[in-house]
Amino acid sequence: MALPLMPGNSPNAQLKKERFHKSQHFIVYGGGMVLDLEKPGIGGEPLVGQKFLPKYSVYPKGEGSDLPSWVAFDKQTLRFDAYFKEPEYDAKVETHRIRKCKIFFYLEDDTIHVIEPSFKNSGLPQGTLIHRHRIPLPPPNDNQFYNVFHFNINKDIVFYSRTFTVTDCDLFTKNFLSKLGITLNEPATVPEDPYTNLRLQHEASMNPLRPYERLHPLKQFLENDGKTLRFYCLWDDTDNLFGDQRELVLHYYLADDTIEVIEVIPPNSGRVHVPKFLRRCKLPKNAPVQMKPPGAVTARTVLNVFGTMNEGKHVVLDSCDIGAATDEFYKDCDLAIGKEINVFGRRVLLTDCDEFTKAYYRFKYGTEDFTPVQHKAPPAPKPPRLVPPYNGFGSEEDSLGNCHGLMPKPVHKDFKKFMEKDSSGLNSNVLRFKARMMTTDPVHRGRVFLITYFLSDDSLSVFELEQKNSGVIGGKFLERQRVKKPGQELFKRELPEYFKAQDLYVGGCIYINGVNFQLVDADDYTLGYMELHSDEFPITNVGTIFSKLRSISEDKQNEVRAFLSHNTPVNGGFVSFESFRDLVMGLNCGLTEHEVLVLARRFSEHPAPKEDVTLMLSVAQHYLRRNRFEDYNLLSARFVHSDRQKSERLPAEEVRNICKAFMLPIPESLLEALLTEYADGGGIDYHGFVAGLNWLEHPAPAVMTDDILKYEVSARFDGGRSALKNINCSSLVKEIFSFSPNKGEAEAAAST
């Protein structure tokens, strides 16, 4: 039954074909037209009876991939051990030779490389037998090439009419062929080579005609080349006229047991500087001795056993060394600190040696005593170099630099301290204190100052905060500089002392340019930094504070118990900071205001202050508007480009770096506060962050001058004294005095 001629029912197989090109079967060869039988038919399909030969090896079964062979099999090589039998027609004692070789098959392109390992005294040009290339099969299949399936153990392979027998292969080759499904044969043995056996027998039967001596002249040189022992010596020549003590340096070369002596000529001694006191040679012990005639000093002595000059003679070596010279020379075992050696009639004393020489004698001879010989008085101490006093021009360091040389150099700064204490990320390494003037004038007594101390270079600056209706204009009070301590002489030889970080603490006083300031408070970072580095700031050491509190008398402890019994039932052991300060300062145990703050911070419980986001955005837009920043589209595009995951969230560190790259004119403290507010579990919403900063499209309400000044001078004392609301006095007293509030209440009731 015939199917209707409809789509899908046509028996024509060419409906799905896409290639219909025809191959060129005729080529011009030797001036005539030749038929190329390897070209395919229409569309690349093979003709009737035509077979395409594979060009390269296939992949192992179960491990195939779509990668090309030069990528999948890169640097993978199969190695086979083989041999071939080479006939010999000109030799008398052999008819053939067995030559061992190695066959390398490169999987990436089916190339083969055959080499023959070099054999000593073989007389054959060994090495590479067949360079790496694709080797065709023997005729009549010479139009094909060897691939991986043609190799196996205990199998003969013909390369260019030479038959190679594969005997074995390495472990990688065995595993690879097994994965291809090839059954490996048992390893074959290599037949013996008659010529090689003959050579081995001939070498074993060879004996020297003269007595064999175990002399290794190069062994000592190879082991000790470049190794030299150095001794410091003294030659006392005071017995002779105009003689004195002369210092020498002796070098002993372990490579050939030779000695070299160099004289150390001091400056302005009047002697002529000579290169060497003794050139490098073997130093005899009994020098000076009579010179030996030529030929007397030789490494070997030859004896004429029999024969004359005209007749044949026979010579042998003198194994007993009867006529050899018997001079004794200094060895390394003869040298030691405190010994004297004879340097051609001069008695030289060994006084000291270097560290390598000590290690050598300690390892080889077990010597442990290397006490040097004291042969000269210790040098006199140098007189102190007095510098003139300060003359008032420039700084003291600059004036002192002019006294050290004719060419003055810049003052050397502590770069290591600068790198360690410079601002890095959120760690600013800057201490900020709130201070007031210590004066009886009511106008100046109400002025508030911000003292900033920079730990990187020990400098400080003073900024006066503006007060309403005070009649005093705020602003910069003192430029950043190092400040000298008061009470020092102006024109003196020593460098002046400057205020250090340890001199600044809450409750302390600091005298700056005729004005006496009292530090009344510090910000949270300053208090935390000083408590974290209590070894640098002993005033924040909690152990020292506890020791002062434990040293109070029994009457003062009773007052503490009475205070606890009065406050514990009402407030649960929590008191205000003012009450806590009055209690601690009333104990008269020598605590300062800063130590009271340390105790209060340790036992305080206060929530973190909440920032006003609207106020922060208003202040940020004020800075951006004042500096005419309008690149919000570029800033938003940069955030989108950095968001690889398209999650509309970025880490805080990356957002901070992008803001610094765009040079946003926003104070560091304000930027950190904004990043904290816009951060959530997955990062920072950069779209909302940019929208909040955009004063062109989303203007924020105006702000007061005090709010702007708060972020401009970075004076944020929210974590200082003002943040201490409730102090757990019960925990403090229990930890220090080891009694609980209940016990104190019971004792108070009993006394009543």
Image (cartoon, grey):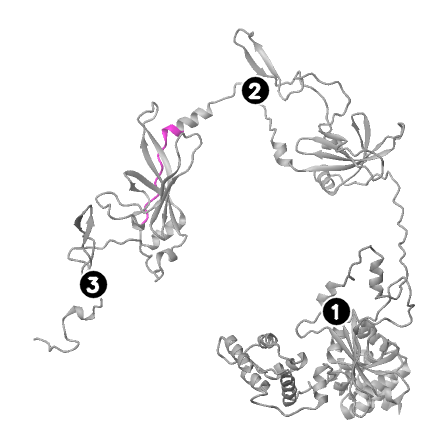
Asked if the residue at tag 3 contacts the one at tag 2, i.e. Cβ–Cβ closer than 8 Å, the answer is no
- Left/right of residue 260 with respect to residue 7 in the rendered view: right
Residue 503 drawn above or below residue 414: below
Question: In which image quadrant can residue 476 be found?
Answer: bottom right
Report whether residue 606 is seen: no
Question: In which image quadrant can residue 432 be found?
Answer: bottom right
Q: Amino acid at mark 1?
A: Ser
Between circles 2 and 1, the one closer to the viewer is 1
Tell me the residue at 85%/64% (across/down): 396
Classify the position of the C terminus by image quarter: bottom right
Q: Residues within 10 Å of mark 2 (few under 14, many from 20)?
A: few
Between circles 2 and 3, the one closer to the viewer is 3
Q: Secondary structure at mark 3?
A: loop
CA separation, marks 2 and 1? 81 Å
Q: Nearer the viewer, residue 361 or 291?
A: 291
Q: Amino acid at mark 3?
A: His
Residue 129 drawn above or below residue 520: above
Q: Per the image, is 192 magenta?
A: yes
Q: Per the image, is 326 magenta?
A: no
The percent position of residue 263, horizontal first and vertical second, equals 79, 34
- Left/right of residue 337 with respect to residue 204 in the rendered view: right
Q: Amino acid at mark 2?
A: Pro
Chain-order first, disc 2 or disc 1: 2
Q: Which residues are magenta?
A: 183-196
CA separation, marks 2 and 3? 88 Å
Mark 2 highlights which residue? 211
The percent position of residue 365, horizontal first and vertical second, equals 72, 36
Chain-order first, disc 2 or disc 3: 3
Label number found at residue 21: 3
Mark 1 highlights which residue? 456
Report whether residue 339 is seen: yes
